[in-house]
Each structure stands twice: as structure tokens, then as C-alpha cells.
Amino acid sequence: MEKKTIWIFVITVVVVFAFVFIQQLITSSNEQNAKSTEVQEAVVEEVEETKVLTPTYEPASYSETRETFTIETDYLSVDFDTKGASISSIKMKNYNDANGDLADVVFNGENDHNAFLLYWGSDIENPVLDNFDYKVEEGSDGISVQFSKSYKKENGEVFTLIKTFLFKNGEYLFKVSVDATGAELTGSDYSYTLGYEPQVGPGFHILKNNNYDYRRFYAGLIKSNGKVARSTVRLSNNSFYSTKDFKWFSLTSKYFTVIGSPVDQDAAYLYQAKQGTGDISQTNGFFISVPAEKTEVMDFYYYCGPQLKSFLGSYYSGTDNAWGIRGLNLDDAMESGSMLSWLENILKALLQLLYKIIPNYGVGIVLVTLILKLLLWPLTKKGMASTSKMQALSPQIDEIKRKYPDNPQKQNMELQKLYKENGVSTLGGCLPMLLQFPILIAFYGLLNKHFELRGAMFIPGWITDLSVPETVATLSFNIPLLGNEIHLLPIIYTVSMIFSMKYTQASNTSTAGSNKTTMWFMTWGMPIMFFFILYSAPSGLLLYWTVQNALSMLQQLYTNSKVFKSGLQKEAEKPKKTSKFVLRYQEKLKALEEANNNNKKGKK
């Protein structure tokens, strides 16, 4: 191996290791700030000077008794805490986490606050953590949980703070009502603030790569024409404040979401977001501050559940949901697809159709990959045949390059003549790849976020969840850049890519032959780089790419065999089959040499 090649390999590996290491540091320390990008219309950050007051209300009575209890609907199991009249857990009965337990939308560290705490004024540092009285009622309207607590104002007047949660069967959306009548907080622009503080679950330790898992913060900005534009919230000093009109706020993961929406859209609310300061470092928490004059009953809708259009899109019409809600377009809060989302939908429909026939999404991914290869075969066949012909013509190509080492223009003209005589298109290998690229990108996007892949098993005991990396062993120590989990699929994928690149490069000697270093890097360097990049990729994605590589290699082998059978390769390897124009050039060159020799003799 050349020294230059060795140095390129060493530098490539060092760069890849450094890139992955730095990326992990940035992602784990401040993923949201580093990665948030604008979606539609920028949310204008308004860091305001707000009047923050310390709580001035004292409980009219004290209770040392703290209770926790659970209510259940057909979709949710909700754990309540009388301390702060809050919610500590919202488990979804139809979805499990990685451990097989019910997936919990509320994800907190041990030292973090519960959800739906109340704050006096706009002070979001000191929640109301008194023990509340409560009662649970179940009726035709749903399951109601009402918390109440009496408070005394500075002038001795007593008022009752009431917080009510209402749940319905068949819904991930519920209503939170706050009645703070009489709680006019003197000197503040806001009477109270309702906060959702936890991170959206299921739980995680570290988000290793936000391309495959993430937590993002969005806002539904009401524009002047009344339409809603989904926008990414940008934090400044780990906080966000704005008095603009919003329809909702959402904290979103790849599969689940928490959305808060005030019913009274005409009220001037102060929206606040903040970076987690407890055990969870990723961005979490959004707060809705209610104006000082709004102390009567205020209603807020909260959706805590799967990020599926079948649920989120049911609030356009009152007949599609149990609440009778109209015009609350929560599907605007969903992760938007790329400009190829229409193609993703077609591939998704095909994958779901195959799943109905064979109820295994892993088999479905293999079959969809095979179907795509067959549909694109007429196109790829031409490209592969073209590169194979160029391989067969490599002796003539090398000969032309030797004859015109210092005349690139003449060299190119003679190569074009050779290609034309043998029916070779120089764009034959590139055009099919360009046309296939949108399909590859769309399928990649689909497999990276298709909800039904979550928890879908392919091979029992090995690939048990296509939405996460498969793990064959867990070590007691960490391997640099890879962690302590051993994934087998990335190794299989890398091997398949090496063989695929090897056969592809061998079929394109017109390019690779002139630069062995480039050929070596494409065959070995690229697969090594992608091994580290895709090591933590979901199993479904790696399965797709592995099958794609295997089928591409088989297609190339088949095409090569057809070219060999056609006799082109055998004829090309025979010296006597040198093309006519090369022979004519050799005769002219010989004649010129003889003429030059005769002239020299004549001068003597």
C-alpha cells in the first residue's frame, strides 16, 4: 500500500473520531439550542421586563397530609399528587417503553417538578406546593378531578383556588381549568401562571444523535390572516418570553408530544419556556401566564400522547372527537416532512399494504426494497451496463492515456470517439443514481420516523424493535465513540457496503483505475466512516441500507456477467482488437518517426 494512501486512511479515521466525539459533547450538553432551526416563520423573541412578585397569599388552612392517587381512562393512566395539585405521571396504555412498561409522557428527574403546577404572578421559580383537598367524580361528561385550597390575602380576605382536570375515554386530550376568582395580585401584570415543566417521555439517558431521537420545542403562531404557522422556539439564556398570539405550544419527541392550548385565544398571555435546571438537561417546560384581570375560570386543553395524524387531526371537526372541538388544528404541531413527504406517503402506503399480507415490518422493509429495485431495474441496468462496458474498454482507455499524457484535450477527444464507437454513455452510471436519489431519501425519512416501527419486531431475540438499535451484548466498559453496547447490524451493513463498493468500483475502472487512492477510499474509507455515523441508527434504517447494498451488488454481478457473455470483455482483452483509430494513429506516428530520421540523415 502506498504511503499516501496510508496517510489518507489515518487522517480520515482521526477526523471521523473527532467529529463524532465533538458532536456527542454538543448534543448532550445543549441539543435544542445547537440544533433548532426555523420551520415556517421565525418566532420573534421578546425578552421582556416582567413584574415578578413573591407569593403574597398564605394558605387559610394547613394540611400535612400528602396523597397520591390514580385515575384511568381507556387510553391513559394518570397519577396525581395533592402536593401542588399536580400530575406526576401520564402513562399511555397502548404503548410501551424500551423496558416493556407503559410509556410515560411525563419524564422527570428525581429533583424536578411535577406537571401542571401553579405559580402566583409570573414568577416561575416558586411553584405553589401546598397540599390540596380533592374529589374525583365520574359521570357522563368524563372523569373529573377537582383540587381546592383556600388562601388569605394581605387584607384578610379569603378566596378559594380551584384546579380541575377533566378526562374522556377515547382521548389523549384533556382539559385543565383554573378558577382563581378573587386572586387579584396587586402590582403584577399577571394573576397566575400554569406550567408544564417535565420533559416529554419515554425516559432516556442521553440523546446520542438527534437525527434518530430528539426533543424539540415548537409554537403555533397566529398570523394576521388568522392562520397558524408552526415555528421553532429559540431560547436566549435558556429562556423564551413572548406576548404574541399563539394557538398552542408543543414539546415534541420523535413519537410523542405534549401540546398546550388556551381556550381563550383573545387573552394576552405571556408564554415562557426554559431549559431544564434539574436532572434533565434537554429543553423542557412551557408556561402560560394569565393576565391580571383574568381570575375567573380559565380553560386550557392539553394533548399528551402519540404523534399520529389520526389523533392530532381529529380536532378540525366537532364530530371527530369526544370534546366536540372545532378548528383546533393540532396536527400543525406534528413533525413536518421534507419536500418529498408525498413520496414518503406512497412508500408508507406500500409498506402498510405488505404488512397486512405479512405482519412483520422487517419483512415489509425487505420486500419494499426489493420492489423498488425491480421497478428501477430498467434504469439501473443501463447505468450498470455502461460502467461494465467502460471496464471492458479499460485496455484501450489506458492506451489512449499513455499516448496523450500531455494533451488532455486530444485525450478527451479520442476517448469520446472510443465511447461512441462502442455505445458507451459517460453519464450512464450517474443519471440512474440521480433519478433514484429522491426515492432513497424519502424511504430514509419514512423509516426514521414511521410510528408503526416503534416496538415492531423483525427477528425474535435479535432485532426486537426496528425503531432503535439492536443490541447483541452490553459490556461493563465503554468502547471509545461506540459506548458499551455492541450492535451487529452496523457491522453487517459495513461489510455489505464494502462488497457493494468493491464491485461497483471494479466496474468503473475508467475512473478508479486512474486514481487508485480514490478507489481505495471509496471501497474502504467510506464504509468505515458510515459505520461510525450509523452505529446508533434505528434497526429499520440499517436493514434497508444493508438489503439495498446486497441487491445492488447482485445487480452489478449480473450485469457484469452479461457483458462478459456478450464477448466485449474478451475481445477488449486481446491486443489485436485495438480500435482502428488507434492503429491509424500508430501508423502515422511510425511514419513521422521515419521521416524525421531520413531528414536527419539528409542533413548529415
Image: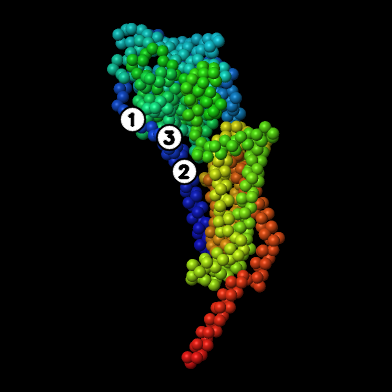
Label 3 belongs to which residue?
Answer: 40
User: Mark 3: few, some, or many residues within 10 Å (few <14, many ≥20)?
Assistant: few
Q: Residue at x 53, y 37 (%)?
A: 341
Q: Residue at x 46, y 10 (%)?
A: 133
Q: 156 and 593: which one is in front? A: 593
Q: Is residue 50 left or right of residue 387?
A: left
Residue 560 horizontal/vertical position (percent): 66, 57
Q: CA distance from mark 3 to mark 1?
A: 18 Å
Tell me: 552 left or right of 210.
right
Disc number lying in front (3 or 2)? 3
Question: Disc 1 residue type?
Answer: Glu
**Mark 1 vs 2: CB contact within 8 A:** no
Mark 2, residues whose alpha carbon is within 10 Å: few (<14), some, or many (≥20)?
some
Image position of 74 with respect to 547: above or below: above
Please state the horizontal and vertical placement of residue 358, each as a whole percent of the image: 69, 34
Q: CA distance from mark 3 to mark 2?
A: 26 Å
Q: Is residue 457 left or right of residue 478?
A: right
Amino acid type shown at disc 2? Gln
Q: In this rendering, does residue 474 appear at all?
A: no
- Nearer-N-terminus badge (3/2): 2
Quarter of the N terminus within the rendering: bottom right
Q: Which residue is mark 2?
A: 23
Mark found first going from the N terminus, 1 or 2: 2
Earlier residue among tags 3 and 1: 3
Disc assigned to residue 71? none
The residue labelled by disc 1 is: 46
